Amino acid sequence: MPTELIAEIALHATSGRGAPGVLSYHVPPRLRGLVRPGQLVWVPLRQSQLQGVVLRLAPVPARAEGLRAISGLADPEATLTSVGLQLAAWVAATYRAPLYEALALLLPPGVGQAAETTWRATPAGLAAELGALPERERAVLYYLRTRGELGERALRQALRGSDSELRAAYADLAERGLISRGASISPPRARPRHERLARLLVPPAEFPAVLEALHRAPRQRAVLEWLAARQGEAARDPAPLAELYAATGANAALLRALERRGLVAIESREVRRDPLDGIVVPPDQPPSLTTAQRAAYTAIVEALEQHVRPGDSEAAAVGGAPVFLLHGITGSGKTEIYLRTIARTLRLGRQALVLVPEIALTAQLVRRFAARFPGQLAVLHSGLGLGERYDEWRRLRRGEARVAIGSRSAVFAPLDHLGLVIVDEEHELSYKHDASPRYHARDTALQLAALAGAVSVLGSATPSVESYQAARTGRYRLLELPERVGGGIGADGLPRSQTLPLPPVRIVDMRHELQGGNRSIFSQALQQALEATLARGEQALLFLNRRGAAAFVMCRDCGHVITCHACSSPLTLHHEPDAAHGAPAAQLVCHSCGARSPVPVICPQCLSGRIRGFGVGTQRVAEEVRARFPTARVLRWDRDSASGKGAHGRMLEALLRHEADVVVGTQMIAKGLDLPLVALVGVVAADTGLHLPDFRSGERAFQLLTQVAGRAGRRFAGAQVLIQSYNPEHYALLAAQEHDYKGFFTQEIAFRRETGYPPFSRLVRFVYAAENQPNAQHAAEQLAARLQVQLAQRQLVGWGLIGPAPAFIQRTRGRWRWHLILRAPATAERETLAALLDALEPLHGWSIDVDPVHVL
């Protein structure tokens, strides 16, 4: 007799009110052999159905009475591997998230479904006297009698009652036997796409006779002739019905008539939604490697061959694979190292994962990767449609694609035979997810590699302070590419790498410009450089990390700044096209919550009419360039202008085809883009963000300036970089001017050691938001007191608190924010931190961010 099993299942807790995280269920006989760890299943809970993931199976214990059975499988393909289950458990434990939330990150996009309770009137309810019922019950029953069976969501929207009132009404009516409960399950938001096709079944030898028999059915005859002409004598591939209908004017009834005669077969096949469809892939011409590139490549390949054995099973990976930090200056050829090590990984029978920080960067890298690995690449990022992501996920799960490239969430791609993990621009803060689970994709990728026994490569021209310190102390292996390389052709006609100098960087002191009477947003030096660049037919890139036309709007009489009604953030002035008149219309936009409002004509504080915008944004810079250089083709590249699907790819293509002379953009253009025609980079306002109350502000400024400077002169000498600043003596700017990462690191690591910030500590940030400030302050002070008690009771030496205090952005979406920061030694055990945080639970209303990338 087969052993009876129980399954421990992590539940989709948000599907049911008060649902616990993990419960045990009986595996019914019909599902034995089908249910396995990692499987997505349906289970009953109370009177509803929830989705859950099977964590483990075990024999039924002696005392297992009353266990309910698993209802069924949700999606046979939605099965996680043992590595995936371990990774989700690590994410949940490390970042303080419900286990199912972490597991859901690894499931196919759009596969999640929700069960909703429905109600319908019984025969007794249809005949009942409505006037005898209380008002709320009468409204519910009347609505169900007139509309039929409805879900609780629809009833709530229609009757506009509170949840507690409606629940009481449902219970009363059900007890009277007037309504009965049911359930409905929403369809998955993504599923395979199929197209219907027609196949000609008539053999060529019989075709003339069949056409003769149809001489009185000209439309049917026309369909057969079209199919025959399309398919030819040898090719018998079916034709899409949409194409057939358009060409012949046929319809479904006519096709069914031909099908009944046995002349045509109607078939269905799955159609892949390909993210690369329509993308022009350049020819692949791998250049020769420089000495430094070859040394880096050799080191990674030796690690691959030592730690990643050829084979197809998960067990083929050998543990203890190293982590490499590839520190290469901008334009030093890191991508070519990625491509070659991936090729070696594929020859070992393994798969590779490549993470990039921005969708904009994905668009360019995808072309190079698609050229090198045709048919083997899967692309995953939020800019794709849900169906595209679903199809790419399934290609990876089935092993049809062996290289996954994408932004943050691609770290959860279903790669069962992983051999290599690459995190490009590893320093980028956008790798941190800003909603629960608040995972860091770089750190999660390293954990994934450790679980799979894969080799890891972290690449950057400006590594994070934590990563470079790890390389200095031996935790990571440091590989360096100190020379910039450009493309060239050797004497044998093959691509060759040639060294190029980094562009010279000049810092322009804007205080002197102001003293000299120049109140323009452009210094004299930048104006002259722009004019010369455009005259030579070259491209210029202007960088400003702020969107809009003006940073804020202020009254020049009383100093009042217009702020968002729901946030403490100043509203930013935008000029947006007026749909009715075609002219730009001024609007104020909150960059925190997205709220919009008209620009006031008079000051709401003192009623003065002297109100105007101050500061600049990318929109204002673009307008200024057009005004000064009317013939220049200006492209603005920021979150406002690149919001549509495929927008980043289109903008990149416009630059590469030299359809723009000047590009004005925010930080998304500073992240690894290879723009070969850019000869001038101008940083309009280097001081933006330089003095924010955050321990990473100096590091962030240096990284941005170094990265954006690296966009210039990537194919030729003679490029230049101009940085405008009111703080030209700042150490981050001076280090960026010299392209001196090590000099910057020396100063920054001393600051971190002195102040006790990472990498010399670990931080946990707690944020509480309330509708009024006293409540937020009270909650923060209470939690601080509880934390102090816990630290004292556990005798945790070297641990401490920063705060509580108002958050830098004090109010957002109508809620006041207070925060406090727990600081633990860098050597603190994960289990010690977890036990401390467990002792604080429940923390209702608190946002907890472990290892935050900022404390604003």
Image (cartoon, rainbow, N blue to C red):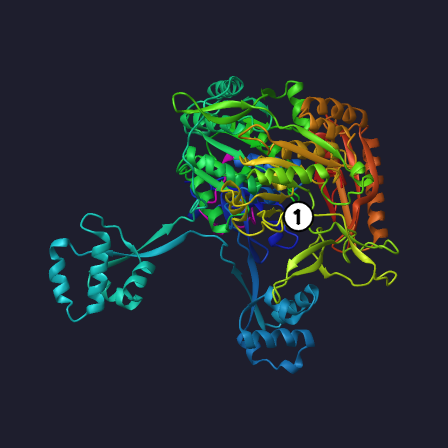
* Percent x, y of residue 442: 60, 33
Front one among 384 and 258: 384
Depth order, front residue of 681/41 = 681
Question: Residue at image x 42%, y 35%?
Answer: 371
Q: Quadrant of the N terminus?
A: top left
Part of the protein shown in magenta: 65-83
Q: On the rendered structure, is 237 left or right of 207?
A: right
Q: Which residue is mark 1?
A: 628
Q: Nearer the viewer, residue 103 or 580?
A: 580
Residue type beneath disc 1: Arg
Q: Is residue 641 visible?
A: yes
Q: Secondary structure at mark 1?
A: helix
Residue 68 in magenta? yes
Q: Can residue 829 be seen at all in this image of the molecule?
A: no
| Label 1 Cα neighbours within 10 Å, binned few <14 / some 14-19 / many ≥20 | few
Lateral position of residue 211 relative to residue 659, left or right: left
Residue found at x 54% / y 18%: 292
Left or right, 415 with reference to 511: left
Instruction: Report how many numbered discs are placed on residues in the image.
Output: 1
Residue 82 position (above or below residue 580) = above
The vertical placement of 1 against 245, above or below, is above
Q: Main secondary structure of the magenta part?
A: loop
Q: Is residue 577 magenta?
A: no
The C terminus lies in quadrant: top right
Please state the horizontal and vertical placement of residue 95, each as a whole percent of the image.
Answer: 66, 38
Q: Does residue 849 appear left or right of residue 676 in this picture?
A: right
Rendering quarter of residue 754: top right
Please give the name of the residue rendered at 65% of the width and 77% of the height, measured from the top-left corner. Answer: 138
**Res 584 → quadrant:** bottom right
> Horizontal and vertical percent for residue 636?
61, 47
Where residue 740 sits: x, y (%)?
68, 24
